[in-house]
Image (cartoon, rainbow, N blue to C red):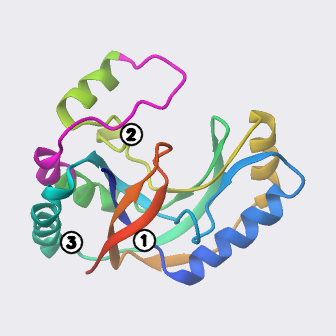
């Protein structure tokens, strides 16, 4: 199973993001839009591959790790490109680094393989080292940057158009719901397996 341990936003934030993204993508060739129906908005903490038989132990470990986590307020910052993808960057990186690092440290030993490499570029030595140690290069150390993925375009230039159309969104929320989720090959959440209230 391809998994992601995430922070889930409240429904009203998802509606703001979906409405703005669909409007901004109108008339463009889109590979996918995160709409909270087929793909779910999420702030990734740690991607991992695990067997279904590991799930009870993983759930117990997440619950234990979250006992020391205090929810914080997250605010919207700006839309930004990531290749052909569109992300919405969020505040709180410094405050969230602690839970990100704890989740990685306590859950990485339960992984049973590596996440797929989806980039068209060859991995750097640093990325290879992270993949060998943690099973993924994403959200490890300095690569942890709180964001929501909004969509992916067929053309890179269209991603820039979408970002310009989206402009500034204003929202905030408390990080009070953690999710254990199943993801697809593009690392997008397709199913919320378990929610943890903190």
Of marks 2 and 3, which one's residue comes earlier in the chain?
3
Relative image position of residue 39 (x, y in whole percent)? 55, 62
Of marks 3 and 1, which one's residue comes earlier in the chain?
1
Q: Left or right? Give the position of 189 relative to 165.
A: left
Q: Which numbered circle lies on residue 8?
A: 1
Relative image position of residue 55 (x, y in whole percent)? 17, 62
Instruction: Report the residue at 30% width, 41% height from top.
Output: 140
Instruction: Report the residue at 44% width, 55% height from top.
Output: 146
Residue 86 visible = yes
Residue 171 visible = no
For numbered disc 2, what is the local secondary structure? helix
Q: Which numbered circle lies on residue 90?
A: none
Residue 26 figure quarter: bottom right
Q: Left or right? Give the position of 103 relative to 126.
A: left
Q: Left or right? Give the position of 158 relative to 1.
A: right
Tags 2 and 1 in contact by the CB under 8 Å rule?
A: no
Highlighted range, magenta: 104-124
For numbered disc 1, what is the local secondary structure? loop
Front residue of 76 and 33:
33
Dot in front, 3 or 1? 1
**Does residue 176 sit above or below 142 in this rendering?**
below
Separation of marks 2 and 3 at Cα, in angstroms = 21 Å
Mark 3 crowd level (few <14, some 14–19, many ≥20, 10 Å Cα): some
Dot 2 corresponds to which residue? 143
Residue 167 figure quarter: bottom right
Q: In the rendered structure, does residue 123 fall within the stretch colored magenta?
A: yes
Relative image position of residue 113 (x, y in whole percent)? 22, 36
Dot 3 corresponds to which residue? 69
Front residue of 56 and 79:
56
Tags 2 and 3 in contact by the CB under 8 Å rule?
A: no
Separation of marks 2 and 1 at Cα, in angstroms = 20 Å
Q: Residue furthest front?
A: 53
């Amino acid at each position: 199973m391809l998994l992601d341990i995430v922070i889930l936003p409240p429904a009203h934030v998802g509606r703001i993001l979906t409405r703005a993204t669909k409007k901004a993508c109108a008339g463009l060739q889109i590979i996918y839009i995160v709409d909270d129906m087929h793909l779910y908005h999420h702030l990734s903490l740690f991607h991992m591959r695990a067997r279904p038989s590991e799930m009870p132990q993983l759930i117990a470990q997440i619950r234990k790790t979250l006992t020391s986590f205090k929810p914080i307020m997250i605010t919207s910052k700006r839309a930004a490109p990531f290749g052909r993808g569109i992300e919405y960057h969020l505040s709180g990186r410094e405050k969230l680094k602690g839970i990100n690092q704890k989740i990685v440290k306590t859950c990485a030993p339960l992984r049973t393989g590596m996440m797929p490499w989806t980039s068209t570029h060859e991995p750097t030595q640093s990325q290879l080292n992270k993949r060998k140690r943690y099973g993924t290069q994403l959200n490890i150390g300095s690569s942890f940057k709180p964001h929501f993925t909004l969509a992916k375009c067929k053309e890179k230039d269209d991603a820039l158009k979408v970002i310009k159309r989206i402009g500034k969104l204003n929202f905030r929320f408390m990080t009070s719901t953690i999710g254990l989720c199943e993801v697809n090959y593009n690392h997008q959440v397709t199913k919320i397996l378990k929610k943890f209230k903190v």
